[in-house]
Amino acid sequence: MDTIPDDISSLVEDNFGDDEVDNCKDNDSDGIWPVIWDFAGQAVYRAIHPIFMCPEAVYVLAFDLSKNLFDKPGGNTGDNPSVPNPDSEDSNLDHIMRWMDMVHSLKHSAESETLPPVILVGTHADSVKEDPDRIMDCLLDRFCKNRLLGEHIAGSVAVDNTRAGKTLGQEDPGIVRLRRQILEVANKLPHTKKEVPLQWLYIESKIQHEAQCGVKYIPKLSFKGEIVEKFCKIQVDDVEAILNFLHDRGTIIYHENANDSNGLVVLDPQWLVNVLCKIITVVPSREEKINIRSHRKKLKEKGILAKELLDHACREQGLEQVEQSLLFLMEKFNLLFRCPSMDNEEIYLVPCMLTARPGKEIIPTAVDTSSSPMYVTFKTEYVPIGLFSRLVVLFGVWASTKSSCEQQQIFANAARFVLDGKNFLGLVCFKSVIKLLVWSQDKLDPFCNDSGFHSEVYR
């Protein structure tokens, strides 16, 4: 490396060459700048979000103040109406709480603070007839009843987003306050002032240049040899530390794969979003072969992704060499689950493509069976994202050893498995609990509760 890039050198000059930096009270010269992710709300995108989330971020949770917290927005699926929304019965408050629960899954503590921090932002303040702050207070009171999620809240503000980006003095004061809150919260994070080698920023600059030139991804060993060792004069013993630093910065997407020393390093995060969406798309092309069209139909109707369709999607995008790395990411973050093969065909369950079904259609009521259900509860009062689908797959694998997996019925919120000729296993997912029941078709059978399935399931 002969010279330091202009953008890096100017940053150094701004922070270390100004004698007035030490006297600056507002920390405007501390080199803190935002890397922003805007998460869409459709089912497919929401399933992808955890891949991009990191515990070192500041999260801004925006909601519409003009919408009643207890109203149900319905089953709007956005741009792709063929993708079902299993949470259509959730209220606006439920959606807020589910987002908070997702952030809570990254919980860690530092200096007695609960991280990651979340700033609540109520938008459309201009459309609210009553005092916007009163609505915000109402939401904060709800978090007082759910302290585990409420501990993440580091600030709140109501904004009139129609006055964003205006000239000084005309901009909404709430937006000005929001900027200040974000900087104040960021300044308190333990890693904000952590020193990193200057050459790491040069590596970041190189990566951004490569992405702009159309390089979407690079294998880990190539990243080490072609970028790190080429542009770092200092000895680099821990490439993993650089990768994690850049991932936390939002520059790349990287998740360590213990089974692959040459894992995928994504240089263009938006490219990864597009690729994953194309892999699980249900929209067929008239030019496709009938068997591929049939696989797409099964994905749409049953949430089952055939390996042949996965191979086809990767081949169409020229991604055969990184297919296993993409599969690792999708399995790691519950975007899909490997299922027992049917007719020697490798298949995957894609939860975000499943439709919902009333629980009473899946398992019998208490009066129809002599069995007692078991309930799995959660301290956050919400079922963690991806957990129900993982349980369904695990139970499905076990149930397939008892009977044909073709008899399984799996939906977004419920599943039923046939264990033998007369015994069944059912699961139903509610907002805050998962209900599990083993029952016999013949409730008059005195031995129906002694089949052995109860002890196998409940242990």
Image (cartoon, rainbow, N blue to C red):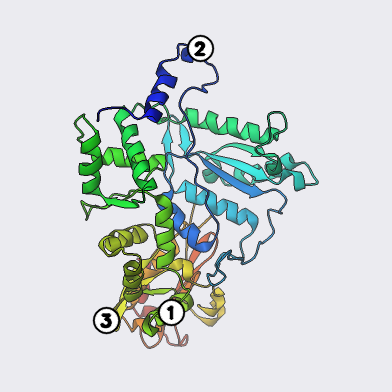
Whether residue 455 is visible to the viewer of this picture, yes or no, is no
Question: Is the residue under label 3 in contact with that under label 2 (CB below 8 Å)?
Answer: no
Residue drawn where x is 65% and y is 36% of the image? 175
- Residue 30 is situated, as x and y percent measured from the top left of the image, at 46, 23
> Which of the numbered marks, if any, corresponds to residue 23?
2
* Residue type highlighted by circle 1: Lys
Q: Which mark is first along the chain, 2 or 1?
A: 2
Q: CA distance from mark 2 to mark 3?
A: 71 Å
* Residue type highlighted by circle 2: Asn
Q: Is residue 328 above or below residue 141?
A: below
Q: Is residue 43 above or below residue 146?
A: below
Tell me the crowding category of disc 2: few under 14, some 14 to 19, or many 20 or more residues within 10 angstroms, Cα based: few
Whether residue 304 is visible to the viewer of this picture, yes or no, is yes
Look at the numbered disc 1 and give the secondary structure of its residue. Answer: helix
Residue drawn where x is 60% and y is 56% of the image? 94
Q: With 87 as the anchor, is 53 left or right in this view?
A: left
Q: CA distance from mark 1 to mark 2?
A: 65 Å
Q: Which mark is first along the chain, 3 or 2?
A: 2
Q: From the viewer's side, name the closer residue of 204 and 136.
A: 204
**Residue matched to label 3:** 344
Q: From the viewer's side, name the closer residue of 294 and 305.
A: 294
Quarter of the image with the C terminus in it = bottom left
Q: Which mark is first along the chain, 1 or 3?
A: 1
Q: CA distance from mark 3 to mark 1?
A: 17 Å
Residue drawn where x is 38% and y is 82% of the image? 289
- Residue 236 is situated, as x and y percent measured from the top left of the image, at 21, 34
**In this rendering, the label closer to the viewer, 3 or 1:** 1
**Residue matched to label 1:** 298
Look at the numbered disc 2 and give the secondary structure of its residue. Answer: helix
